[in-house]
Image (tube, rainbow, N blue to C red):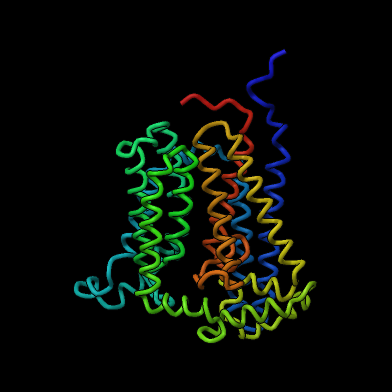
Amino acid sequence: MSTPSVRHPGEFRWETRLLAVVTLTLTGFGVANCLAAGTYLATSYREATQQALAALVGGVIFIIAAYTDYQLWRRLAKPLLYATIAGLIVLAIPAVIWRKRLAPGFIEAIVPLKLGARRWLRLGIQLQISEIARFTLAAWVSMRLAEMGTKVRSLQEGFLPIVGVIAATAGLVLVEPSVTMAVVLTATCIAIVFTAGARIPHLLAPVAVGFAGLAAIMLIDPVRAKRLLAFSEPCAAIDQVCNSLIGIGSGGITGLGFGRGSAKLGHLPFSYSDFLFSVVAEEWGFVGVIFVGICFGLFCWMGFRIAKTARDPFGTFLASGITLGIGVSAFMHAAVVTNLMPATGLTLPFMSAGRVSLILCLFSAGVLVSIGRRRGRPAREK
């Protein structure tokens, strides 16, 4: 008796359910730790309460995305990417050019300056376009790779056009400036291209150029140079990194107890966002660190299993991109907090305070569940 070519959807059900449970667990645990980090500081407490609201909104979006056929994002990939690039171009327009023609306060009303960068676009609501680019760029790259098939192995017909769009989008993010997000976008999409079967010699050149450009930025830009110094001497350059390590060390095996850490007293700036993992280590100890690590490990494991068994190439590439984006961001956040790499300001997916980031992470996880739910079912005819 021959083996059926299409597996029954019930055989995959446990994977999508486990992915959903892990996603909601990380979100709930993150909201709790944001509240703990923001107990005494008014700014932090406001961020934490808004994070709880974002979790509720994101949960609804997660469910909607999970029950929506992911092929919708294949059809919308182009307009979504065009809209994203348009938003990035607005953010990249130098303020000095705008001031020559418009009132000085106009640019601040549309593109506010926060912590030395213009990463947010105010259009009724405040949007961080680079966070949106995580999904829209991955969806476009996945769509194009699915269309071109083996042409991706051709340098001129397949590889260069794809990498050109990736580089242009990452370059616009770099202008904000947001070096870390540009690195995440580039690494994620290049990995998708590699998954699609691109030739390794073709990949080596853009990777080498990217590393050279990143090294130049770290050495030339005084802000990045200071962070690089903090990486080599954390307690001599930046107190934030030093206090993060102190918090991690004071947690021990089981931690100081939920809400009993000192980070919330103001010793660790941005403890509820950029350095949330330090709060977890301080209050939950090594046990909490292992728990979070296992959750992210399970998320990536399920994500790659879904990518491997997706019903079509677009699903495979998009699932790989979503999983890589979450995994790379989580790893970089933990590496910064433990001083394994220079400080970047990258939030911990699902957990750190950041309303747009949380909602988009939950949406992306919902799309991943949608890809997983439709495995074993024949793809619809176009």
Instruction: Identify which residue, 221 or 359, lies in the foreground.
Output: 221
Quadrant occupied by the N terminus: top right
The answer, for residue 298, to whether it is visible in the render is yes
* Quadrant assignment, res 251: bottom right
Q: In this view, does 17 lie above or below 53?
A: above
Q: Where is residue 366 in the image (x, y as percent from the top left)?
A: 60, 47
Please give the name of the residue rendered at 59% of the width and 44% of the height, measured from the top-left corner: 368
Please give the name of the residue rendered at 38% of the width and 79% of the height, measured from the top-left corner: 222
Q: Where is residue 326 in the image (x, y as percent from the top left)?
A: 57, 55
> Total marks drawn?
0
Q: In this view, does 252 lie above or below 64?
A: below
The answer, for residue 42, to whether it is visible in the render is no
Q: Position of residue 178 (x, y in %)?
A: 42, 66
Please give the name of the residue rendered at 64% of the width and 41% of the height, measured from the top-left corner: 305
Q: Is residue 358 left or right of residue 40?
A: left
Please give the name of the residue rendered at 69% of the width and 35% of the height, measured from the top-left corner: 12
* Quadrant assignment, res 58: bottom right
Q: Residue at the top extreme?
A: 1
Q: In this view, does 359 lie above or below 251?
A: above
Q: Position of residue 43 (x, y in %)?
A: 57, 80
Instruction: Identify which residue, 322 or 336, lies in the foreground.
Output: 336
Instruction: Identify which residue, 213 or 127, lies in the foreground.
Output: 213
Q: Residue at the left extreme?
A: 100
